[in-house]
Image: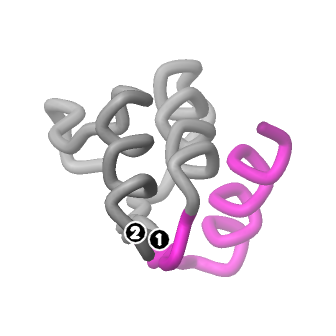
Amino acid sequence: MRAAELIPEKAAEVGLTTIHDIFLSPDEMRRYQEARRRGWRNVRVQMSPRIGSIADAEKLAQMDVHTGFGDDR
């Protein structure tokens, strides 16, 4: 959770408004989502899941990782 809070903070400090974090596990994606729910993220984060198997895709679906937070972040 600390990384999900710290990475966007550091990006904003140097003027970045959007970051891309690719090849994330479902757990890592959930941490970003939780950070957003808590109001920690102050930059846009484009995420791409790491899916190497059907099991990975199923885990992603079961963990309630989703798109569309209802805003531009």
The relative height of residue 63 versus residue 52 in the rendered view (above or below) is above
Residue 17 location (% of width, % of height) = 44, 70
> How far from the left and from the top, in percent, is residue 25?
57, 58
Instruction: Tell me where the magenta segment starts and ends, as one range.
Output: 1-24
- Tell me the crowding category of disc 1: few under 14, some 14 to 19, or many 20 or more residues within 10 angstroms, Cα based: some
Q: Nearer the viewer, residue 22 or 19?
A: 22
Question: Residue 50 bears which disc, if any?
Answer: 1
Type of residue at label 1? Arg
Q: Amino acid at mark 2?
A: Ser
Q: Quadrant of residue 63?
A: top left
Q: Is 67 in front, or is 35?
A: 67
| Residue 28: % across, % down | 62, 50
Q: What is the quadrant of residue 31 in the picture?
A: top right
Is residue 43 found left or right of 66 in the rendered image? right
Judge whether 42 appears above or below 66 on screen: below
Q: Which image quarter: residue 61?
A: top left
Q: Residue at x 33, y 54 (%)?
A: 57
Q: Secondary structure at mark 2?
A: loop
Q: 17 or 23, which lies in front?
A: 23
Give the residue displayed 36% in from the left and 37% down from the top: 65
Disc 2 from disc 1: Cα separation? 9 Å
